[in-house]
Image (cartoon, rainbow, N blue to C red):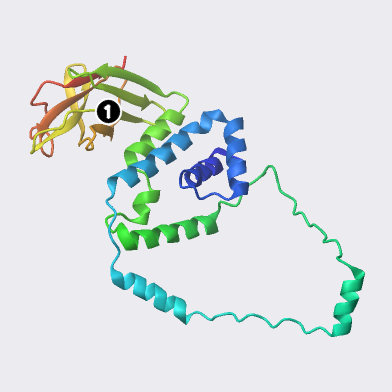
Amino acid sequence: MNERDFADLAVGHALNALSEADERAYQEALAGNPQWDHHVRGAVDTVAALSASIEPVEPPSAVRASLLARISELPQESAEPRDARTSAEEEDFAAAGIAPAAIVREPVALRSSARTGWGTKRWFALAASFAAVLVLGFGAVTVSQFFAPPAAVVALQQIEDAPDAQSASATMADGTVATAHWSPSTGQSVLVADGMPELADGTTYELWFVRGETPIAAGIFQPDADGKATAVLQGEMQVGDVIAVTIEPAGGSPDGTPSTDPVVAVATA
């Protein structure tokens, strides 16, 4: 099993949607490749985030009526009549006694050399199931949003998987730790923080590459309700840059330069 197949199984495991064979293959692959556990954490975090961020909605009463109507239209199978036996045949069976039943055991594959069945058809069925759930109660979320992780999460994963991945951290005045992740080979950099203070209305956090004495705008971001943020820096970082964050008016600094002192600055050299 390759890492991409394992990543697919990790999503199915997080959704509790694997068959027994797939679950067994997943556990064996994880035991043999513990370095793949970041796929497990990512899948679990994504499912948990979706579950926590969406309020359930009571489905309309018409949905139940429509489903029952559709069920009533399905052809119903009638019970097949029991084969008639003559009294003589029954007597013969009684005389012969009870014949031992042959036990048939299907072989179980303990290890899969290719994909373990979590393929296109399974994904299509799972997506269809989610589509039904979304129609009934989660109208604000689309299937594509569920299966497509945010760009910042994808970038962070690519950085962490790169052989030249690096990181550095700095602590904000309130104790919040911000960590910059970057990789020269991918040309990407991401800032991750947990517990950033909530901003006043009309303001936003802005990222900067500070190159020598020159600040270079690298995008804006807003933490979630818990103060967590994973933000991609726009542009390519250079060796020795400092990654800084300032508080700016909504939309970012109007003149392209910081209007406040940095709330955090992460040295990358």
Front residue of 172 and 69: 69
Any part of residue 115 in sight? no
**Residue closer to the observer: 82 or 149:** 82
**Residue 203 vs residue 238, the one in the foreground:** 203
Q: Is residue 120 above or below residue 264?
A: below
User: Going by the image, does 18 lie left or right of 58?
Assistant: right
User: Which residue was labeled with disc 1?
Assistant: 194
* Residue in the image at 37% along x and 33% along y: 156
Residue 117: percent from left, percent from top: 60, 52
Q: Quadrant of residue 261?
A: top left
As drawn, 180 above or below 85: above
* Quadrant for the N terminus in the image: top right
Report how many numbered discs are placed on residues in the image: 1
State the SS at label 1.
strand
Question: Hey, what amino acid is under mark 1?
Answer: Asp
Q: Position of residue 48 (x, y in %)?
A: 37, 42
Q: Which residue sits at x=32%, y=37%? A: 152
Q: Is residue 146 visible?
A: yes
Image x and y of residue 46, in percent: 38, 42
